[in-house]
Image (cartoon, coloured by chain):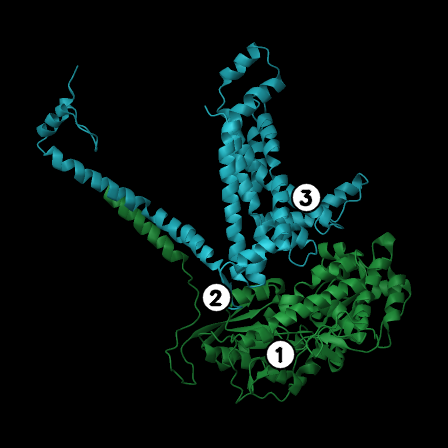
Chain colours: A green, B cyan
Amino acid sequence: MSQKTAAIAVVALALSALTACSNGGGQGTERPDGDTTPDVQEDVTITYGIWDDTFRPTYEEILVDFREQYPHITVKFEVTSFADYFTKLQTSISSGNEPDVFWLQHNSFPLYAENDALAPLDTDDVDLSGYPQGTLDQFTIDGELYGYPWSTPTVGLWYNTDLFDAAGIDYPDETWTWDDVREAAATLTDPSNGVYGIVAPLHGQEGYYNTIFQAGGEIIRADGTSGFDSPEAIEGVQFWVDFVEAGHSPNLQQTTDTERQAWFTSSKAAMFYGGSWRASTFASTPEIADHVDVAPLPVGRTNTVAFATGVNVVSAGSRNLEAAGAWAEFLTSDEAQQAQAASGVVVPASRNARDAWVESLPEFNVAVFIDQVEDAEPLPSSLNTNAWESQLVEYLAPAWNGAESVAEACGRVAEMIDQALADER
Amino acid sequence: MKTEATTRRPGPLPRTGAAQAGGAALGTRPTARRPRRRRNDAKYAVLLAGPLIVGLLAFYVWPIVRTFYFSFTEWGVFGGHSWTGLDNYRTILASPEMAHALRNTVVYASISLLAIPLGIAIAVLLNQPQLRGRTVYRVLYFLPVVTMPVAVGLLWRLMLNGDFGFVNAALRIVGIQGPAWLSDPATALIALGVVGIWAALGYDIILFLAGLQSIPEEVYEAAKLDGAGTACRFFRITLPLLSPTTFFVVVIQSINALQMFDLVYIMIGRNNPTIPDTQTVIYLFYKVAFIDNDKGLASAIVFLLLILIIGLTALQFRLQRRWVHYG
């Protein structure tokens, strides 16, 4: 081969390698600007971003019904684990690759709404009567709805019936108070078998947020300052640190090395403040499915529980706004809500689907989670919740390790949150 | 002796008068041919090297230039940036978190550089002529190098689990209560360093083996004749003659170790309270760029690291004439 031919071949090969690198994936067909025809007939593919793979089978069932109504729309699921979800989402929005429809929660919603990342939803033909007005108001800005609420997960006291039977303690019920939990944890801890009475993780939603609310404290007050250093909040955090100090819970290093729910699912901890989203996972974990159940959270000063509201939003940068809106809207229908509830994976936001949730997993007392929504307080949120929430582990770790008193650690947390809230303004 | 006149000279070499006569014998005009061939050769050189150079410019040089520019800007949550001058650099130089991350990085790099003396020792042992199964040993040592860092991190994370991990189970057999390696600030960085050694050892061993085999046998024979013992031969002959390889390995490994990210990300993870005591500069960069979404500050962090690494490498090159024996 002459030098010339060799050179041309090399350049051609290199160029073809470059084009192979380019981002192929289909975001759907380009809609011409100004096209306002309501009927989308050409084939489109939209992506749906979620953070929990246990939902996928349910959504694929819902998708079958959806495609009967909209045969030209295909929905692809993009599952990213919760730990990386928001990191990836923000990056993908900056680069224009975000999913068309995606999950948010009420505490991450403000950041996206403020920064014009969400498209307003067309609610003219949508029946939202099953949704509490308060929930809808959370996602309404200037009279327009920017997200369809779809779930209201709460937290309950999961307990291991076998370990309770072996120790001769009655199962927890709605009469239980903080003292009952403390007593039970002490009795159930069995160092010779490596069993702990309870898991006391360094976690808000499945931990101290609930007890802070139950003690009568607040993480963010209505006036925009932090209540983390109030005596009530300190009490709420101390509740957990006491278990670690007394040896009735694995310590911080143990719950860092091994995830908090793993202690419960391997029967190494008898009690676990776990979310409603754990129900279907526990039901399908053969090691514990037959000997766990859930009770309402033990009462502190009040009965309050922390809850989140999951919401489906449409990206403002979506290239298929019509199709994306159609999918998000479909998920609000009674049928879709009931399908989601019946799978036992999520507490539905719509009242019309609550019975389906209660009946979804007869082996567990999952009605508990619905009852708790009545006395629930939303997870603390601000314009940029992640900015201060991501630092809580670092600030509270010394309290869990015994390096600092709970009061000191909470004081520093309150300062940090105040500073973050001030930066937002 | 035959004159060059009848020999056809290839390429753009300067021609002697005799050769010109030879060229004339071929029936062409020599002077016009020379520049055209040189130009053609240069053209092919550019064409063949072109894709690589374009790739280098597009994917290495241009991003460095852009990062340098972005280090003087501040970014919004979802994109968009504005010029802020030296603010980012001032923030970093005053930040205790950055200083801590730098200290962590240096400690980790120092620990993982222990792979070099270990690698030399193992390479010398592997180089024994009477050793059987040398290929098996080489494969075993090299396996960690070709394993994906994520797989390495996940596996070691499971093995180093404080309660249920393999390492502590093994220690329990001999009666030692092992610490929670990855969640105790006192041990986390050391654990990362050991995994770093494990992952890089094979690469070093292969390079040192090649270096050892380039040392001529005659030198050892002469030394033996002069009565040099094993240790003497090792320190006075092997190490000095191995120094070019050692230099290369030290430079490459310190550059890699100072940029470590994946082990922290996989083994420690962002919800681990030891993060402030284990995060490296690149992990801090990731946190600032993608979790805190402050890409301007992140660009400044990474550019400072670049300057640091360039400085360190330049220093190593200057010092090489003190301890590296070539030829």
Question: Outermost residue toward the right?
Answer: A168
Proximity of marks 2 and 3: CB atoms separated by less than 8 Å: no
Q: Which residue is mark 3?
A: B190
Proximity of marks 2 and 1: CB atoms separated by less than 8 Å: no
Choose between A51 and A236: the one closer to the eye.
A236
Assess disc 1: are there few (<14), some (14-19) or many (≥20) residues with their C-alpha within 10 Å of its C-alpha: many
- The spot of residue B299 in percent (x, y) is 51, 56
Quarter of the rendering occupied by the N terminus of chain A:
top left
Proximity of marks 3 and 1: CB atoms separated by less than 8 Å: no
Question: What amino acid is found at the position of numbered circle 2 in the picture?
Answer: His
Q: Please give the label number shown on residue A150.
A: 1
Note whether residue A56 is visible.
Answer: yes
Note whether residue B146 is visible.
Answer: no
Frontmost of labels 3 and 1 is: 3
- Say left or right for A384 vs A46: right
Q: Which residue is mark 2?
A: B81
- The spot of residue A43 in percent (x, y) is 42, 75
Name which residue lies at 67% across and 54% down. B276
N-terminal of the pair, mark 2 or mark 3, is 2
Q: Secondary structure under badge 1?
A: strand
